[in-house]
Image (cartoon, helix red, strand yellow):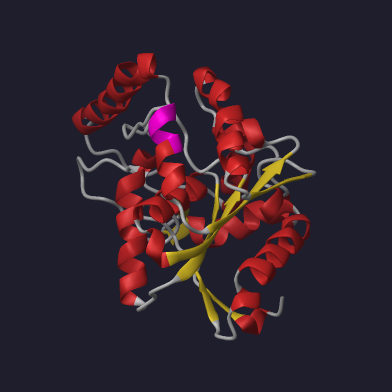
Amino acid sequence: MAEEECRYVALDLTGHGLSSHRPPGDFYSCPSYVADVHRVADALQLRKFSIIGHSMGADIAALFSALFPEMVDALVLLDSYGFLPTDSKELSKVIRQGMDEMLRFEKKTEEKKRVYTYEKAVNRLLAANPTMTDQSVHILLERGLVQVEGGFEFSRDLQINFKNIWRISLEQSLEMLSRVQASVLLVLTEQGSNRTFSEPAQRQFSSALFQGLKDRNHTVVTVPGDHHVHLNQPEVVALVVSDFLQNKVLSQSNNVRHKL
């Protein structure tokens, strides 16, 4: 698929990269990110487009596609099932955990951000993501660092690491999945697919989500690599995604497509 056939829009989500942070006391949640995506689409006057998302980005893309199905013609989920159910018995515990983290953070006195040398920033990101290659880390740090007096600071909002308080059950996840009208490509990785399950109870739902996609004749592909294969070895994922978009979208239209 030639690059000129598509227009690509890559987002720094709120609180990430060079985008603004949310106001104090405002939670980072999947619905809030979905609203941000809609705002970007409105600003760019995009009426129908395809969405490619990885991990949390895939969750946002899937929810957007469920809530605004008329706007999405193709949905590509990279190493995420799109919806991340929570065991109903765990709902109150995990929601409270997210709130407790926020409330504790609010009580802290203003802390000065840590300043790093570039090399130490690289090592910190590698320590948190040991499966990333050095090249991948440098790519992320292009927009993940800001230069300040004495070195560099990470640009992300610390609050993005708090437990997500927006939760849905397996039943609700499958209902949302049924609302997606777009053609869907799920790309799983041999070593990384379980990375998205931060809570042990969530692993039991993967087979139901997998079956939900298969029942609707969506495309599921497994590729060699780990959770960051799209970044470490993009060629492994690019051909699969390119073929999918070519067959499901571009072949059905002679117009230039928009990819968000």
Work out which quarter of the rendered image holds the N terminus and state it. bottom right
User: Which secondary structure class fits the magenta region best?
Assistant: helix
- In this rendering, position of residue 62 left or right of residue 93: right
Examine the structure image and report whether residue 171 is included in the region drawn in magenta: yes
- In this rendering, position of residue 150 left or right of residue 218: left
Q: Tell me which segment is drawn in magenta.
A: 170-174
Q: Where is residue 11 in the image (x, y as percent from the top left)?
A: 45, 63
Which residue sits at x=65%, y=35%?
A: 193
Which residue sits at x=70%, y=39%?
A: 131
In the rendered view, tell whether residue 59 sits above or below residue 139: above
Which residue sits at x=35%, y=58%?
A: 68
In the rendered view, tell whether residue 56 sits above or below residue 149: above
Q: Position of residue 46 (x, y in %)?
A: 39, 75
Q: How many marks?
A: 0
In the rendered view, tell whether residue 195 sits above or below residue 82: above
Residues 181 and 134: in front is 181
Residues 126 and 77: in front is 77
- In this rendering, position of residue 122 left or right of residue 189: left
Examine the structure image and report whether residue 191 is included in the region drawn in magenta: no
Can the viewer see residue 80?
A: no
Q: Position of residue 165 (x, y in %)?
A: 31, 32
- In this rendering, position of residue 90 left or right of residue 105: right
